[in-house]
């Protein structure tokens, strides 16, 4: 029996919270969703701008290898399309 064939079981238990705790959880989930969507929207905007850059097409035409990777990395850094830049964006929301 391979590792993927191991039976898995999930136990679901209802969460018992007071009405006040429920309201806090709902508001927290809504705030998290809004932040996620804002960061996702910004990331997609940056990606679109990056893909419209003529350097993107030039990088795509390069042979596979270090130079091509470096060209894409430079574009990502220029447009702030990396984890750190998006984390900074998120903190400023």
Image (cartoon, helix red, strand yellow):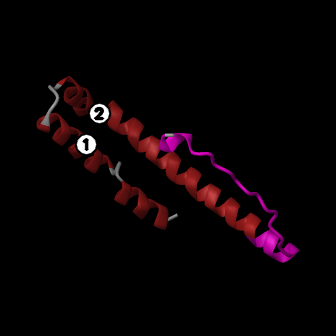
Main SS class of the magenta portion in the image: loop
Residue 11 x, y percent position in the rendering: 73, 57
Q: Give the magenta range.
A: 2-24
Side (left or right) of 14 relative to 29: right
Identify the residue under disc 2: 53
The residue lying furthest to the right in this view is 19
Q: Earlier in the sequence, mark 1 or mark 2?
A: 2
Identify the residue under disc 1: 75
Side (left or right) of 80 relative to 35: left
Q: Is residue 49 magenta?
A: no
The residue lying furthest to the front in this view is 1
Residue 26 x, y percent position in the rendering: 76, 64
Q: Are marks 1 and 2 in contact (CB under 8 Å)?
A: yes
- Report how far apart the C-alphas of labels 1 and 2 lie in the structure: 9 Å
Q: Residue at x 81, y 70 (%)?
A: 22
Could you say whether the residue bearing mark 2 is in a helix, strand or loop? Answer: loop
* Label 1 crowd bin: few (<14), some (14–19), many (20+), radius 10 Å: some
The front one of 63 and 52 is 63
Q: Nearer the viewer, mark 1 or mark 2?
A: 1
* Label 2 crowd bin: few (<14), some (14–19), many (20+), radius 10 Å: few
In which quarter of the view is residue 16 placed? bottom right
Residue 24 x, y percent position in the rendering: 75, 72
Q: Residue at x 35, y 60 (%)?
A: 84
Could you say whether the residue bearing mark 1 is in a helix, strand or loop? Answer: helix
Residue 56 x, y percent position in the rendering: 26, 32
Side (left or right) of 48 relative to 73: right
Q: Residue at x 57, y 45 (%)?
A: 6
In which quarter of the view is residue 23 placed? bottom right
Q: Residue at x 74, y 68 (%)?
A: 25
């Amino acid at each position: 029996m391979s590792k993927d064939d191991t039976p898995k079981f999930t136990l679901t238990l209802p969460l018992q919270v007071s009405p006040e705790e429920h309201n806090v959880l709902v508001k927290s989930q809504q705030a998290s969703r809004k932040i996620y969507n804002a960061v996702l929207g910004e990331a997609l905007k940056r990606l679109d701008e990056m893909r419209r850059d003529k350097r993107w097409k030039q990088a795509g035409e390069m042979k596979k290898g270090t130079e091509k990777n470096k060209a894409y990395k430079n574009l990502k850094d220029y447009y702030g399309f990396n984890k750190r830049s998006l984390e900074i964006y998120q903190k400023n929301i």
